[in-house]
Each structure stands twice: as C-alpha cells, then as structure tokens.
Image (cartoon, rainbow, N blue to C red):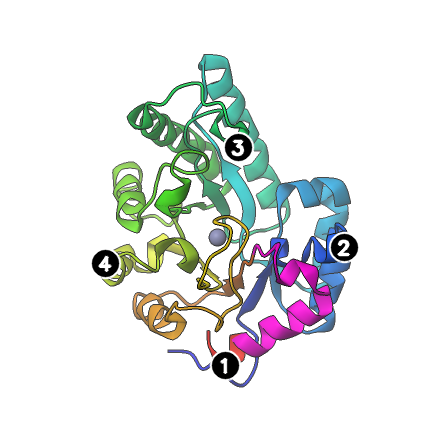
Amino acid sequence: MRDFSQDHRWLSINTATVRKQQGAEVPLARIIDQCAERGIRAISPWRDQVAAAGLDATARQLRAHGMELSGYCRGGFFPAADAAGLRAALDDNRRAIDEAKTLNAACLVLVVGALPGALDGAPHYTDLARARSEVVDGIAASLEYARQVGMPLAIEPLHPMQAADRACINTLEHALDICDALDPQRTGALGVALDVYHVWWDPKLQQQIARAGQERLLAYHVCDWRLPTRDLLSDRGMMGDGVIELKRIRQWVEAAGFAGYAEVEIFSALDWWQRSGDETLDTCIARHRSVV
Ligand code: ZN
C-alpha cells in the first residue's frame, strides 16, 4: 500500500468540502487557489460551480496550476416521469460528458437518480424496479457517447438511505453487475466511484472491490461515519473522526490495482462548513497523512 504519511501528492479535494464556509458560497476560483497554495494536485468540482465560474476560465485556471480532476460531479439522474424527461436527462448527461472532457477529468461521476421527483418530495411514481431499469437504459445510452469522446463513466453506489431520492443503485455489487452487463470487455469506459461513506458497512465490500479490479475502480472518495450521524446527507465526518476503517479499505482498493487519488468529500453543515476553508483544507491534509 502506498505510504501517504510523508506528503499529500495523492490527496484530491471534492470542492463540496469547502464551498459553503461560514454561511457564504466560496467561488470555485478561490477554492482552486486555496488548494494550489497547499500543493494539492487534484480536485473534483461540481457542475454548478463550474457553470458559475465559466467552463473555459476554469479549464485555464486548472492548467495554469497544473491541477488535475480526480472526477467531475456529476452526471446521472436518469429516471423521469415521461419520455420527454428521459430524453432531457440524456441531453444533460451529454453536456456533462463534454464539460468533463474540456476539464480533462479522470471520469464523470454518476449519481444515477431514483424515483423521479422524490428529491422535491413528490415522486411521480414509486416503482423502484422501473427506476432501476431507466437507470440502466440511461447509462447504456450515455456510454455510447462517452466512449466516442473518451470520458469514463463512474457509477457511484449510494447508501440505501438515499434509494428513494438520489440513487437506486445502492451496493458495489449492483453497480458492478451493471458494468458487466454494459461493458463486458472491461474496457475502462465504465466503472465505479467508490465512496466509503456509502459502502463501508457492506459485508461484501472486500470481495466486490477485488471483483471490480483496476479497470472498474475509477475514483475513491473518503470521509468518515460520525457517531451519532445527525443528518443523513450533510453530517459526514472528517477522516479519523468516525468508525470507518479507512486504511483497511484503501488496502483492499490498492490490492485491486487502484493507484489514483483519495478524494476527500465531506458535506458537513454542522461542523466543517462552519469553519474557514483554510482550516478545513489544512485538516484534510493532516488527516490524509495520518489516517487515510
Ligand atoms: Zn462521493
């Protein structure tokens, strides 16, 4: 396993970690500068942040800093109430793939979606099997275009607590079954984003990471599971402040061949978003070295 204790060359920052500091939205350009000042070599930004900052301006700034994207957040949300909605989702994913390409991202992360409308509290239907089949169709259609332009798609299985509103693919095994169905040759065009917050509890985790192998492991996201977890979406812990055995999971991931960034992704309305971005980033670096 790689030694992270001496430097943080394999640290990436998901920009959601430091975007809402102390009640104010931090512009993406500022976050990139804060990361560059600390020798952080990679980030994973969100589409709305890039849209606000400008796609080309962001690409230029990243190039100027020699900074990479460990992933781009995010595509997905394929299920819809009707045919027009399904088409609109495919169009939107195509745009996301183009943006990811312009930014030279390692992959486009897919939060695949679930019951359409559920995020707003009013699902158009409650047939989870239908949502799952629309997800498979959506990934298959997007994959065709993603292959043409050379942008890998990374399915992120989400914790089952988010099966209704954000993602109806909830285990690594389920995500890999879809990868095997749509990309049986294991070309690297389709894989998974493995986020410890979503999968740490899974009794099949080690086995499925080994099954995934290097071709399917496209991104690795770290944070921690706090006790108690006060909010299911936005109370993620800083690495080392919870119960996830991060080094054990990284050992499995690296044994399977993953050699990319450990991307810190912490949604923390109750703690880290209340501190300065500088303090949060400095803590990410220290914890990356000591516990990731
Ligand atoms: Zn994630």
Helix, strand or loop at disc 3?
A: helix
Asked if the stretch drawn in magenta spans residue 164, the answer is no
- Identify the mark nearer the N-term, 3 or 1: 3
Decide: marks 3, 4 in contact (CB < 8 A)? no
Decide: marks 2, 1 in contact (CB < 8 A)? no
Decide: marks 3, 1 in contact (CB < 8 A)? no
What residue is disc 2 on? 29
What residue is disc 3 on? 93
Q: Nearer the viewer, mark 2 or mark 1?
A: 1
Kindly report the distance in space between the C-alpha atoms of the residues bearing marks 2 and 3: 24 Å
Q: Is residue 140 above or below residue 70?
A: above
Residue extending farthest to the top is 83
Q: Nearer the viewer, mark 4 or mark 2?
A: 4
Few, some or many residues within 10 Å of mark 3 (<14, 14–19, 20+): many
The reply to whether the residue tagged 4 has its Cβ within 8 angstroms of ligand 1 is no
- Kind of residue at disc 3: Asn
